[in-house]
Image (tube, rainbow, N blue to C red):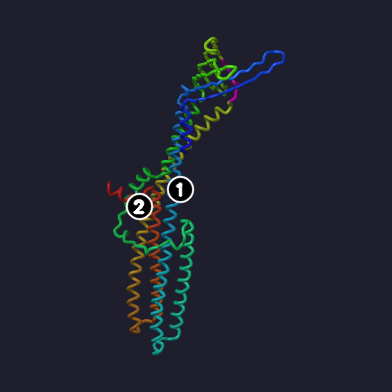
């Protein structure tokens, strides 16, 4: 994009040409003619009706578009990386939950084995606890494999070895007493910060200028030119020559017309030259009208896309906001469920010790508690994934979102 700006910037400067020519005409029964010349020529567009400046501004807009496109792709990578990281944390935590369940089941097995030796437990209870233990071991192996595969995929995306990736124990203290900004304030922030919206706005500016450029196709281009140099038959050349002139080129209804005039002297001022010319290229640009129509259509489409994108961004923020709120509510419910099952497990363990219920009832509650912990972990992960989605929808980091709200 910087190269394009440089190219368009060059169009605003004069064009300088240095040319050396040498010719030898050998004639039969006539005098031979040998000439050589060294000329410097400067051409400068003194009037293009702003076409050069418009082309330069279009190049600047294209550069800004490239920056926004890069940022958009970068944000997508950040979002997918965060989602993969949170998923890794969830899978690692699942291993810990299943391991905790296995430890609890093995403790129950020791109790049942001791009771069976005393004739207080049946063989069926022993089989039941062994079945639950086998199921927990199976789940641990499955969770470990899933975590290992996801870790390899994550390392591949980052381009680093698995051994250098550390997945710390997730902490969720930041969710305590969290205050989510209002949906309307988040939508307003998105309208200010979403790179897609900035890109769309730059596209409108670009197509508007291209449409203006196409509309002014008929306006002339006026160019001044001047040349200075030496001619002669031998080297060094000793005949000074110079020339100045003006040319006008314009297109009208697909026909290109041009005219020009020049004045100069050569042979050290002994010869004066005055030249005039005019030409018409008949219907050499038949696509002039289509270029105008295409540019106008692109401009109108860019405006419509901008309006549609504005509505789509508002919808994205609204959906992401609702998902965050829903996930936070689910976390509270899941926490309550885990707390109740932990109390139930403790009570049932005491009842089983007193013989009021069987150890199998305790096993079922322990399994339910493990499933509840998994649901809690999943909902906690959903909160952070949904916050990452909200961050992407607004176009600002979560920390910046809260900072903006506090400043208000």
Helix, strand or loop status at disc 1 = helix
Residues tagged 2 and 1 counted as in contact (Cβ below 8 A):
no
The percent coordinates of residue 208 (x first, y second) are 45, 32
Q: Nearer the viewer, residue 172 or 289?
A: 172
- Asked if residue 257 is among those painted magenta in the image, a careful observer would answer no
Residue at image location 35% in from the left, 60% down from the top? 329
- Give the Cα distance between marks 2 and 1: 19 Å
The percent coordinates of residue 69 (x first, y second) are 45, 44
Few, some or many residues within 10 Å of mark 2 (<14, 14–19, 20+): some
Marker disc for residue 73? 1
In the rendered image, the vertical position of residue 75 relative to residue 169, given as above or below: above
Q: Earlier in the sequence, mark 2 or mark 1?
A: 1
Q: Which of 407 and 24 is in front in this view?
A: 24
Most distant residue in the bottom direction: 118
Q: Nearer the viewer, residue 269 or 397?
A: 269
Q: Mark 2 points at which residue?
A: 398
172 displayed left or right of 147:
left
Magenta stretch, residue numbers: 277-284
The percent coordinates of residue 8 (x first, y second) are 47, 32
The percent coordinates of residue 404 (x first, y second) are 31, 47
Marker disc for residue 273? none
| Residue 284 sits in quarter | top right
């Amino acid at each position: 994009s910087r190269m394009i700006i440089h190219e368009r910037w060059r169009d605003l400067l004069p064009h300088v040409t240095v040319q050396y020519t040498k010719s030898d005409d050998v004639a039969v029964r006539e005098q031979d003619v040998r000439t050589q010349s060294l000329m410097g020529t400067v051409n400068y567009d003194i009037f293009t009706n702003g076409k050069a400046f418009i082309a330069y501004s279009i190049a600047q807009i294209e550069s800004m578009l490239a920056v926004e496109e890069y940022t958009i792709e970068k944000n997508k990578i950040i979002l997918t990386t965060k989602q993969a990281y949170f998923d890794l944390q969830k899978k690692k935590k699942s291993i810990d939950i299943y391991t905790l369940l296995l430890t609890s089941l093995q403790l129950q097995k020791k109790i049942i084995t001791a009771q069976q030796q005393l004739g207080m437990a049946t063989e069926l209870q022993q089989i039941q606890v062994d079945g639950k233990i086998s199921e927990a071991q199976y789940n641990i192996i499955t969770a470990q494999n899933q975590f290992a595969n996801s870790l390899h995929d994550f390392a591949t995306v980052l381009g680093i070895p698995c051994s250098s990736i550390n997945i710390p124990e997730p902490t969720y203290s930041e969710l305590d007493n969290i205050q989510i900004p209002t949906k309307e304030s988040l939508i307003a922030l998105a309208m200010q910060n979403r790179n897609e919206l900035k890109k769309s706005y730059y596209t409108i500016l670009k197509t508007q200028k291209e449409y203006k450029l196409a509309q002014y196709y008929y306006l002339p281009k006026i160019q001044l030119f001047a040349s200075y140099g030496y001619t002669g038959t031998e080297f060094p050349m000793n005949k000074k020559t110079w020339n100045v002139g003006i040319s006008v080129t314009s297109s009208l209804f697909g026909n290109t017309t041009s005219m020009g005039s020049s004045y100069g002297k050569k042979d050290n001022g002994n010869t004066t030259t005055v030249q005039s010319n005019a030409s018409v290229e008949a219907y050499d640009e038949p696509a002039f009208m289509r270029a105008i129509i295409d540019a106008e259509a692109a401009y109108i489409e860019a405006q419509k896309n901008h309006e549609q994108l504005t509505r789509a961004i508002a919808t994205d923020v609204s959906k992401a906001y609702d998902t965050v709120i829903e996930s936070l509510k689910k976390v509270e419910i899941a926490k309550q469920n885990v707390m109740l099952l932990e109390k139930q497990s403790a009570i049932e363990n005491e009842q089983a010790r007193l013989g009021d219920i069987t150890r199998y009832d305790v096993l079922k509650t322990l399994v339910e508690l493990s499933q509840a912990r998994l649901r809690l972990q999943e909902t906690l992960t959903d909160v952070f994934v949904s916050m990452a989605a909200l961050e992407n929808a607004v176009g600002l980091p979560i920390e910046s979102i809260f900072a903006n709200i506090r400043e208000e």
